[in-house]
Image (cartoon, grey):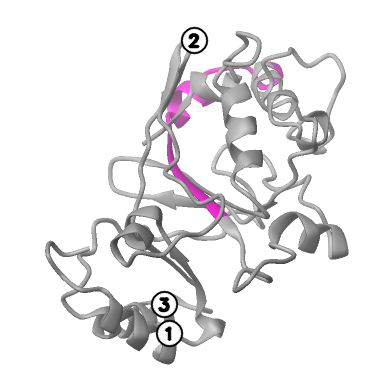
Amino acid sequence: MALESNPRPALARLRKGFDPAWGVVGLGDPLMKTIGAALPGLRPFPALSGPGCSVPSTQAALWVFLRGEERGEVFDRCESIRALLGDAFVLEEGTDVFVYAGGRDLTGYEDGTENPQGDEAVAAALVASGTGMAGSSYVAVQRWVHDLEHFRGHPQAEQDDIIGRRRADNEEFDEAPASAHVKRAAQESFEPEAFMLRRSMPWAGAQERGLVFVAFGADLDRYERVLRRMAGLEDGITDALFTFSRPI
């Protein structure tokens, strides 16, 4: 948000002018505090530090996820958002994402394999009840930078061990190490279960590339529990994902 600005008029314009077919709008904790509103369970995500890894807290006031059939369409929608928000908000970061190899991460592995489907996806991603809350969602967004050269330097079997799936057939295998990503982040292994609806997509710039992790959930607790385990804060075992990727 711009310093000393009143975001309410801009938010009113955004609410009136935003077409849901464009994508999703997320309201962050700083914005809600500024306008004196409170949402149960909404909070800044804490910075985490575990064995050999760190996860920064990158909290924003407003988040907009835009979609389109081609780049020009996304650009036009972005310009419309800028016009609606005016000077009340300052764009701090914009990331172009894309579909890679039919829905794979830049490592070549399929992403989102364990996403819930149908009614289970609705239950995992959407808030079921509450005044003004039913049908909404809590979203976790984190940009990761991959060191693909380092990852590709491993033999294929070691790459599979890092992910916990075979790239050739996308199958999990029991002999994968405890640090394998799919074992660290297995949503069904938490109590209560930590299912989310993931919509992560790759990004690439001139110098860096990686994945924008996006997950919709009925609360933020499930995302925090998964990430704490990945960071080794549950049992001291750090997700092997951190050997070649880092959140920024």
As measured in the structure, the alpha-carbon distance from the residue carrying label 1 to the one carrying label 2 is 43 Å
Local SS, label 1:
helix
Q: Is residue 231 left or right of residue 190?
A: left
Mark 2 or mark 3, which is nearer to you? 2
Q: Is residue 186 left or right of residue 63?
A: right
Q: Say which residue appears at 68% left-offset and 55% top-offset.
A: 218
Residue that numbered label 3 is attached to = 74
Above or below for 68 versus 171:
below
Q: Say which residue appears at 54% left-offset and 21% top-offset.
A: 231
Q: Nearer the viewer, residue 48 or 79?
A: 48
Q: Say which residue appears at 39% left-offset and 61% top-offset.
A: 96
* Mark 1 vs 2, N-terminal side: 1
Mark 1 or mark 2, which is nearer to you? 1
Local SS, label 2:
loop
Q: Is residue 108 visible?
A: no
Mark 1 or mark 3, which is nearer to you? 1
Residue that numbered label 2 is attached to = 51
Residue 237, horizontal then vertical, whole percent? 62, 11
Q: CB atoms at circles 1 and 2 under 8 Å apart?
A: no
Amino acid type of disc 3?
A: Val
Q: Is residue 163 visible?
A: yes
Residue that numbered label 1 is attached to = 15
Q: Is residue 95 magenta?
A: no
Residue 15, horizontal then vertical, whole percent? 43, 84
* Mark 1 vs 3, N-terminal side: 1
Residue 159, horizontal then vertical, whole percent? 64, 22
Q: Which residues are magenta?
A: 139-157
Local SS, label 3:
helix
As measured in the structure, the alpha-carbon distance from the residue carrying label 1 to the one carrying label 3 is 18 Å
